[in-house]
Amino acid sequence: MRALACVVLAAFAASLVACTRVAAPGAGGRHPWTEAGRLRIGSADEPDGLNPMFAHSDATDQVDAFLFAPLFRYDQRGEFVPELATVVPTYANGGISRDSKTIVLHLRRGVVWSDGAPLTARDLRFTWRAVMNPRNNTKALFGWDDIAAIDLPDDYTAVVRLKKPNADVLGIFGGGGGSAYPPLPEHALGSLADLNHAAFNTHPLSSGPFVLAAWNHGSSLEFAPNPRYWRGAPKLQAISWRIVPNPETLLSELATHEIDLVPSVDDNAVERASRIAGVRLVKHPSANWRRLIFNCARPELADVRVRLALAEAIDWDRIAAKVYHGLNVRATSDIPPDSWAAPHIPFYRHDPRDATALLAAAGWRPGAGGIRARDGRPLHLVVSATNKPGNEQAEVQMQQDARAAGVELEIKNYPASVLFAQNGPLYGGRYDLEWSIDTNGPDPDNQGNWSGDFLPPKGANTTFLRDPEITALSDEAIRTFDRAKRKTLYQREEERIHALVPTVFFYWATTIAAMNDDLRGYRPAEYITDNWNSWQWSI
């Protein structure tokens, strides 16, 4: 597959967005298996924490959308929806100064925490100070470290003064992902020297539509309505977030109606899920991208020729078709194909012959058992992912293709809460190759993933690539609000990433949600979380 990854938004959306009803609602009202007012959600993953300053997993982003009110949420299309802020600042409304270095945020009055304490601009300023506190093991500082000061003319106005322009800075006040953190409660946390081990991290106060009633580790998280939510109590009386790591078990519980909603059905289960009575499927594009990343700090992978050899040795089209059933959109960058900044980048060609030539040029010669070696050491690498059957199926295909090129690829997978933990294999740099899904916000900024200034623990550049050109381009791209200039810079950056091969971009996920057709108001989104409007759900 060598066509350029340039997809027109209308065609992309039209090809992916679909709704299939496979059973009519139960006669006379709800189905007999529906528990009125109680939604049971099945998820393969458990959060690795609930304080977004520290937790890395997608499961954290999902459940935090129930618990926290950010200044802005993202709607289905990735547009800002004011939450704690009353309006999205722009040049036109005076919220952004003409020099792009001052942003005025107006907070909603009358908002309180779940314990009744007022939520004010003081909490926002406290959060910035906590993020920048060197005693805190903050997962990413991006955007926050561009803030020179936050002035508070009153309790409901925050004047954010930037050291330099940052086109993505509003995203840090948004709803989930990367370095986006909601306001944290100063009255509950302000007396602590650091927040690393605060009880809040696993049982936080809520500012969102729900409160955490219980976390049964390894089993479920239970949520109750927050009666003090500024919009009023949500329609649902309870949400049960069920942790079901095995896709087969998850499908079985959907079929027996022990679960009402599976936000993302495993690719192997889509056809069977479509036959379950009382369940409808909703198919939509998402800004989740699967990739294989290389730890460029490993001696065996420091040479770009080895990384390119692996990219060319593996038959990615076969994996897309056989393991993932051709359901997703092949990717060549980490900027969504329907983004205004989408670059034109070719796919890596599948060329086993060139792969072996690259390995030979890098000094890896055929050795015992067909495994290449250099200086007496075999080319043995470990690929890691989360413990999901689909991941292992793909890894086995990689393993076979790599072995044909003379590379021994061992599979070692982990629970998501371990792999993505702040001191886990990925962020700790204790891995060779890693196979998982990352997610994007609507802004194309990707500095936190690729800049040499954002290696863990300062950011999410888990490839540990230190390239001055990528670092400079990714920084320059966020220093202007001019989209035409930014698009040019992202094209150059993505070309450089393609040349250095710190990753193989594999696909943009087509997400298929399966839900009890008694569920109302659930509108899956392309970006960050489908739980952006949970106060509107009912069943």
Image (tube, grey):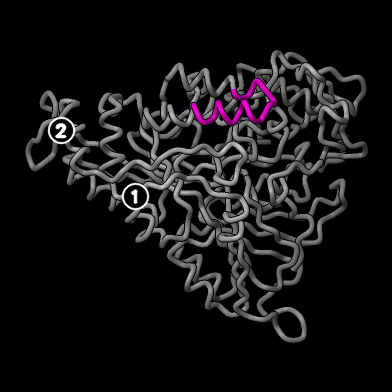
Tell me the residue at 40%/40% (across/down).
346
Q: Amino acid at mark 1?
A: Trp
* Left-right relation of 357 to 130: left
In this rendering, is residue 215 above or below 160?
below
Queried whether the magenta region covers residue 486, the answer comes back as yes
* Amino acid on which disc 2 is placed: Pro
Report which quarter residue 332 is drawn in: top left
Query: Mark 1 or 2 closer to N-term?
Result: 1
With respect to residue 461, does 321 lie above or below? below
Query: Foreground: 151 or 446?
Result: 446
| Residue 430 seen in the figure | no
Between residues 182 and 90, which one lies in front from this camera angle? 90
Labelled disc at residue 99: none
Q: Which residue is mark 2?
A: 378
In the rendering, at what x and y percent does residue 396 appear?
A: 28, 52
User: Marks 1 and 2, how far apart in space?
Assistant: 25 Å
Tag shown at residue 316: 1
Please state if 23 lies on the left or on the right of 89 as rendered.
left
Q: Is residue 330 visible?
A: yes
Secondary element type, mark 1: helix
| Magenta region includes residue 166 | no
Classify residue 76 as left or right of residue 440. Answer: right
Q: Which residues are magenta?
A: 477-492
Pick the quarter of the image with the C terminus: bottom right
Give the quadrant of residue 462.
top left
- Say few, some or many: other residues with alpha carbon within 10 Å of mark 2 (under 14 / 14 to 19 / 20 or more): many
Is residue 203 positioned above or below 29 on the image? above
At which x and y percent is residue 471?
50, 20
Residue at (61% x, 22% y) in the render: 136
Q: Residues within 10 Å of mark 1 (few under 14, many from 20)?
A: many
Residue 395 appears left or right of 41? left
